[in-house]
Image (cartoon, rainbow, N blue to C red):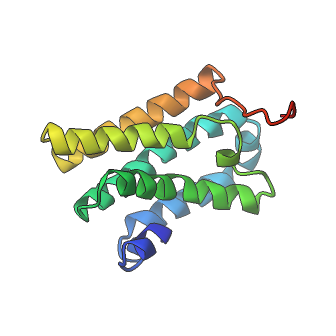
Amino acid sequence: MIRDALLGGGATMLHHWQYPAVIMASVFVTVLFPRKLTDRRTFFQYFDALGLGIFSAIGATIAMRNNLDFLWVVFIAAITGAGGGVIRDVLLNEMPLVLYREVYITAVAMGAAALWVGRCYFGLSEIGGFLLAMGITTIIRMEAIYRTWSLPRIVVHGRR
């Protein structure tokens, strides 16, 4: 919804049944199997990586449809991909993943950049660009989880 407000449109999720359907399916599974799901933190991390890939690619695709330049495509992808996770983490009283050293927004930026380059310089179709962005973002994020990659810390005056 933040993306839609920035782009001057109405809330997309209120006009397409797929958005609330995914939300309701997730709630349904969580209510049916609460104990099974809470014991599987790693499963949720990989599931979150897939969601990050899908939603950031949606944002990047919509930004491309609006003929936005490279930085806006990456920015809109980041807001769309990470926004829901930030809200989820805040509601769970946890620090949002994007504020850790996690490879999170970096994965989104790489996927969105690939979409922009693919569409602008290689003539990829909209669906081809979407799949490329989704794939790159998801793979980078999943690799970061699997290999425990993290971003470097900046040390200021001997403190971390």
> Of residues 9 and 44, which is closer to you in this image?
9
Task: Tell me, yes or no, if residue 124 can be seen here.
Answer: no
Task: Tell me, yes or no, if residue 115 can be seen here.
Answer: yes
Residue at the extreme front: 157
Please state the horizontal and vertical placement of residue 34, each as a whole percent of the image: 73, 49
Q: Residue at x 78, y 32 (%)?
A: 155
Q: Residue at x 59, y 34 (%)?
A: 103
Please state the horizontal and vertical placement of residue 41, each as a whole percent of the image: 71, 36
- Looking at the picture, does residue 103 appear above or below residue 126? above
What is the tally of numbered marks visible in this picture? 0
Q: Residue at x 14, y 36 (%)?
A: 122
Whether residue 37 sits left or right of residue 27 in the image: it is right
Residue at the extreme top: 147
Quarter of the image for residue 65 reads bottom left
Residue at the extreme left: 123
Whether residue 42 sits left or right of residue 76 in the image: it is right
> Of residues 148 and 73, which is closer to you in this image?
73
Q: Residue at x 50, y 46 (%)?
A: 52
> Of residues 28 and 1, which is closer to you in this image?
1
Please state the horizontal and vertical placement of residue 19, each as a whole percent of the image: 44, 64
Whether residue 84 sits left or right of residue 54 in the image: it is right
Quadrant occupied by the C terminus: top right
- Looking at the picture, does residue 124 appear above or below residue 85? above
